Amino acid sequence: MYYNTGDKYIGDWKNGKKEGKGIMHYNTEDKYDGGWKNGKKEGKGIMNYNNGDKNEGDWKNDKKEGKGIYYYNNGDRYEGDWKNEKRESKGNYFYHNKDSYKGNWINDLKEGMDTMILSNGEKYEGEWKDDVRDGKGIWSIHSKDLANKAIKNYKNYYR
């Protein structure tokens, strides 16, 4: 089915609406391949965005909802829960530089008692609020050079 917007749908129909399995090619060059219900994305599906991002996961009522993996065009990756198009509840974020965050999300922001591991071996286990470290936490330095530098800076600071 070709739309006057330039979109193209190939797949199953029911009562004049997309239903079942189908592929939608959008005029923006985005492409969705997956489940449909009552004319909206529903169930398992893969969305390839024209900017190079990709989402594989659950959809409900045309929105990311449930479990999924989102691949960002810069090499970052999020694996976890979605609610109403936003990261929500449990999820892991893997940065392209090998840093990682494992923990809770509320309204697309890091929130709660979580863990951030940096590629250089440093590790933060503690509280987050509104996407930043906030509250109690433990910062671990696993590099001898970094530890020596931190001790030196500490001694110089308190002279």
Image (cartoon, rainbow, N blue to C red):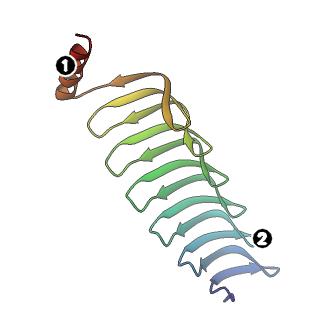
**Residue type, label 1:** Lys
Give the vertical position of 155 relative to 73 (above or below).
above
Image position, residue 29 (x, y; %)? 53, 78
**Residue type, label 2:** Asn
124 displayed left or right of 15: left
Judging by the rendered image, the residue that carries numbered circle 1 is: 152
SS under mark 2: loop
Residue at 73% over, 62% down: 61
Judging by the rendered image, the residue that carries numbered circle 2 is: 38
Image position, residue 25 (x, y; %)? 58, 80
Label 1 – label 2 distance at C-alpha: 64 Å
* Quadrant in which the C terminus appears: top left
Mark 1 or mark 2, earlier in chain: 2
Image position, residue 31 (x, y; %)? 55, 75
User: Residue 23 versus residue 5: which sits nearer the camera?
Assistant: 5
* Quadrant in which the N terminus appears: bottom right
Mark 1, Cα crowd under 10 Å, few <14 / some 14-19 / many 20+, is few
